[in-house]
Amino acid sequence: MIGCDIVDMRRFSARQERWARRVLTPKELEEYSVRSNKLEYLAGRWAAKEAIYKASGLVSGFDVLTRDTGQPYVSGVKGISVSISHEKTHALAVALINST
């Protein structure tokens, strides 16, 4: 299954920190706290979680973290790949449930 979501980053800008505490897991909040592009990070994680939900039905029990290479990955569940992209005012994410 494939899930996709796009979000307007301006949606989060007014109450960014409140959104971050609501949307991000503790591990994601750690990454968020040291980012220079906090708004992009937050919007990208929102889009990724929506895409994962659309592909799998999962709403919790996982983190969307960042490898040293900058690539996002899903931690806490196996078999889900995710890609996140940003362009000016929008973030887009695609999630793929890997079938083995």
Image (cartoon, rainbow, N blue to C red):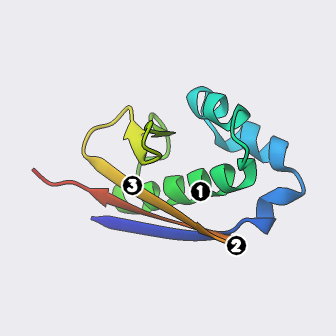
Label 2 sits on a secondary structure element that is loop
**Residue type, mark 2 in image:** Lys
Name the residue tied to disc 2: 88
Q: Which mark is residue 58?
A: none
CB under 8 Å between discs 1 and 2:
no
Q: Please tell me which of labels 3 and 2 falls first in the chain.
A: 3
Q: Please tell me which of labels 3 and 1 falls first in the chain.
A: 1
**Residue type, mark 3 in image:** Val
Residue 19 vs residue 53: left or right? right
Whole-percent x and y of residue 92? 54, 68
Closest to the camera, between mark 1 and mark 2, is 2
Q: Spatial distance from mark 3 to mark 1, Cα to Cα?
A: 11 Å
Tell which residue pokes out farthest to the right in this image.
14
Label 1 sits on a secondary structure element that is helix
Q: Quadrant of residue 82?
A: bottom left
Q: Is residue 53 above or below residue 88?
A: above
Closest to the camera, between mark 3 and mark 2, is 2
Residue 6 vs residue 17: left or right? left
For the residue pair 26 and 54, the one nearer the viewer reads as 26
Label 3 sits on a secondary structure element that is strand
Q: Is residue 9 above or below residue 44?
A: below
Name the residue tied to disc 1: 44
Q: Which mark is residue 82?
A: 3
Q: Spatial distance from mark 1 to mark 2, Cα to Cα?
A: 12 Å
Q: Spatial distance from mark 3 to mark 2, Cα to Cα?
A: 20 Å
**Residue type, mark 1 in image:** Gly
For the residue pair 13 and 68, the one nearer the viewer reads as 68
Tell which residue pokes out farthest to the front in this image.
69
